[in-house]
Amino acid sequence: MSRPELAEALEKADLIHDHDALRSAIARMGQEIGKTLTGSSAIYLSIMQGGLIFAGQLATEIDALLEFDYVHATRFRGTTTGGELKWKRRPDLSLAGRTVLLVDDILDEGHTLNAIREWCYAEGAAKVLLAVLCEKRHGRTVPGLAGDFVGVEVPDRYVFGYGMDYYEQGRNLPGIYAL
């Protein structure tokens, strides 16, 4: 099966948030997180692959002591519908007794984020905070799961760019697009 072309998707898509709006949201989030973490340190866990672009930019906006690691778990593997969670990499740092900041591109239904959050608690994390660039508010999110720090809201449509992919393409687009 050949994958759809990104150029064709971009022709049909609406630009939802441009680069300037996203940079402003990330700066705001960094300030909020810095205030929340004042006087403490946290483990900064980027969720690959989608969280990579956002996580790197957000980290430079946070005025707090952070230790960095990453986790790679996915339910999508190049598709648009989620399946069973597959762990590709767990963090090396011990989470026991620590505050963990999970950083990802989007909170949609939240199954992957919830599974990673629960794993962090099972590893002994004292507190797990969620920082997401975008959040869809549609009523299908895992009950009790919400971003502690949210950059922007996106419509209940297929979104891509700024870390989110369109059939493994377009993660590096400087804005967020919706089909």
Image (tube, rainbow, N blue to C red):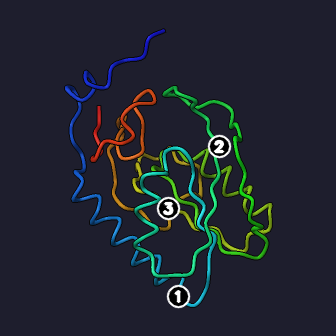
Residue denoted by label 3: 147
Residue at 29 percent of width and 58 percent of height = 22
Secondary structure found at label 2: strand
- Amino acid bearing label 1: Thr
Secondary structure found at label 1: loop
Which numbered dot is residue 120?
A: none
Q: Whole-percent x and y of residue 117?
A: 66, 57
Report how far apart the C-alphas of labels 1 and 3 lie in the structure.
19 Å
Secondary structure found at label 3: loop
Name which of mark 3 and mark 2 comes first in the sequence: 2
Q: Whole-percent x and y of residue 106?
A: 45, 49
Would you say 72 lies left or right of 56 here? right
Residue at 72 percent of width and 51 percent of height = 90
Badge 3 vs badge 2, beta-carbon distance below 8 Å = no
Q: Whole-percent x and y of residue 56?
A: 45, 60
Residue denoted by label 2: 73
- Image quarter in which the C terminus is found: top left
Front-lying residue, 38 or 56: 56
Would you say 154 lies left or right of 96 here? left
Q: Whole-percent x and y of residue 7?
A: 26, 24
Q: Residues within 10 Å of mark 3 (few under 14, many from 20)?
A: many
Report how far apart the C-alphas of labels 1 and 2 lie in the structure.
29 Å
Name which of mark 1 and mark 3 comes first in the sequence: 1
Residue denoted by label 1: 38
Residue at 68 percent of width and 37 percent of height = 85
- Amino acid bearing label 2: Ala
Name which of mark 1 and mark 2 comes first in the sequence: 1
Q: Above or below — where is 161 with respect to 34? A: above
